[in-house]
Structures are given as C-alpha cells and as structure tokens.
Amino acid sequence: MKVPSGLMKVCKCGCGQEVASRFQRGHNLRIHNPAKVNRTSFVKGQIPWNKGLKGLIPWNKGKTNIYSSETIEKMRNASTKPIRLFHNMSRETLVELYDQKRLSQRAIAELCRVSIPTVLYRLKKLGIEPHSHALKGSRNPHWISGKQKARGGYIRVWLDENSPYYLMTDHHGTVMEHRLVMAQHLGRCLEKWEIVHHKGTKYPMGSKEDKADNRLENLQLLPSIPEHLPSIRLQQSLRGLEKKAEEQLRLIKLLQWQIKEMQEEIAILKKERSNARS
C-alpha cells in the first residue's frame, strides 16, 4: 500500500523509519518494522558491564563521619525488629491488652508494629481464644432490639449466653417470643414437647397479627402436640369456610350484576315493541 509523501512522518520511537501519520500510535506491522529499532536493553549474547570485576570496594569503605548523629539515631531505631519484641511479650501482658482492655487485633498490631496475622499466630500459640469478628448482642454498634420477624408472622428474640432461658434457643441463639413470654411467666424453661398456642383474642385466629400478639392474655400452654392439633384443624377449617364464603359473595355480586343487565335489556325491548305497534 502506497502512502503519499506528505502523510509520512519520522517514527517517534527513534528507529528513524518513516511511518504514516495515522499509524503513529498503532505501529501497523505492514508499514513499520519494529525489528529495525535500536535496542538499548540487554540482548542474549551481550557481555555485561561488570563481568570479571570481583571484590568491588564500596564507596563508603574506610570513611567515617559521613552521617550526622540524627541520621544514625534514626537508623538505629529503624534497625530494631519489633517482631522480636512482640514474640518476647509475656502471656499476661497480651491477655491484659486483648481481654481486659478489649483491644482489637488491629490495634495491638499497630501498637506493637507488627502485622495482624502475627498477632493472631501469637494468640493461638499462647492459648488465647481469639474474639469473634462480629460483636454479638448489645455490644454490636448496629444493635436495635434483638427481635426479628420469622416465617409465618412469628417473632424471634436473641438471648445472651448468661440468660437463664438460653437452653431454649436454637443454634443461632434465638427463641420464639411467645415461648419466652410463657417461660418467664412460669419461671422455668419450656420443654420441647410443650406448645404455646395463640388464642386469637384481639386478631383473627391464625392470622399474622395474632401470631405477633405475644401478650400473656393471648397465650395458652398446651402439654403436647396432639392437644394442639384440634385447634390447628379448627383454624384450617375456619380458613376454608372463610374462603368459600368469599367465593359465594363474589358469585352473588356477579349474579346481581347480570340480573340488572338483563332487566335493562328487557326494558329496552319492551319500549321498542311498544313503539313498533304504535
């Protein structure tokens, strides 16, 4: 491909070759041959500059007073290895920092000028149990109330390990609020087979509002699951009857609308017939 001489420019890489101006950035290989570039880096087979030179004398050998007293002091401070000082720290000192003063691993690492993995390794080696990364309970800055909505409208409550009702919790440390309210009323932990039933005194039985209504007046303790089944079946039958009643009401409204439409059509036909006779 021939390029007009006016559009040719000398390549900026220093090879001396003329390249089309529109190929200055891309270095199209069909026009520009990068093999002709004068290489200044080391090439295989080239003799290095320091070959055969052994026992080079450093520039500061035998010289004294080349650094000021301040520079020497800075060099001495920098030459101290904090990691050795940290590993020589006693277990009591580390326990005081980590458990009593409640310093985090990052704070200890910044204080002792070591890395966080070094602090974690030292804690495990001394038999100190590392704290959890997530603060639990009221110690967490995002703590609100310890309550959360569960499936079906129920409410879960988080309990601390020191709570007397902690045996009722699951593996997340939470318990249903209605069971906790009943346990606090009885003054003991509930057994697994004991059921707390919502009576539905304020809201319809089985609704989400009723399941979230954990007042003591709305709760009933049942000794076993079989005694809870009749109330569950009653709730299911009531829901079924309510759905059927709603469907019947819809059908009644539909029939009423159809009857009204037919009456209007009959009235129109009667008027047409009377007009035709007259």
Image: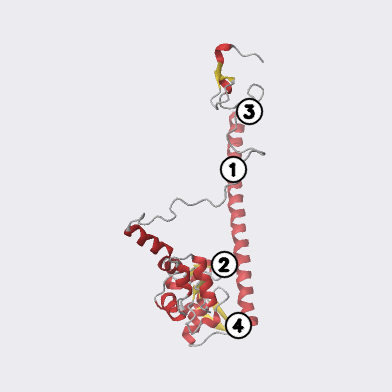
Residue name at image x 47 percent, y 80 percent? 91
User: In the image, what residue type sits under mark 4?
Assistant: Lys
User: In the image, what residue type sits under mark 2?
Assistant: Gly
Q: Residues within 10 Å of mark 2 (few under 14, many from 20)?
A: few
* Element type at mark 1: helix
Q: Quadrant of the C terminus?
A: top right
Write down the quadrant of residue 248 in the picture. bottom right
Q: Position of residue 265 (x, y in %)?
A: 60, 39
The residue mark sitting in front, 2 or 4, is: 4
Q: CA distance from mark 3 to mark 2?
A: 72 Å
Image: 256 above or below 209: above
Query: Earlier along the polypeptide chain: callout 1 or callout 4?
Result: 4
Single out the residue that lies furthest toward the bottom. Answer: 187
Residue 261 got which mark? 1
* Element type at mark 4: loop
Q: CA distance from mark 4 to mark 3?
A: 81 Å
Residue 34 got which mark? 3
Q: Position of residue 267 (x, y in %)?
A: 58, 39
Query: Earlier along the polypeptide chain: callout 2 or callout 4?
Result: 2
User: In the image, what residue type sits under mark 1?
Assistant: Glu
Single out the residue that lies furthest toward the left. Answer: 69
Q: CA distance from mark 1 to mark 3?
A: 90 Å
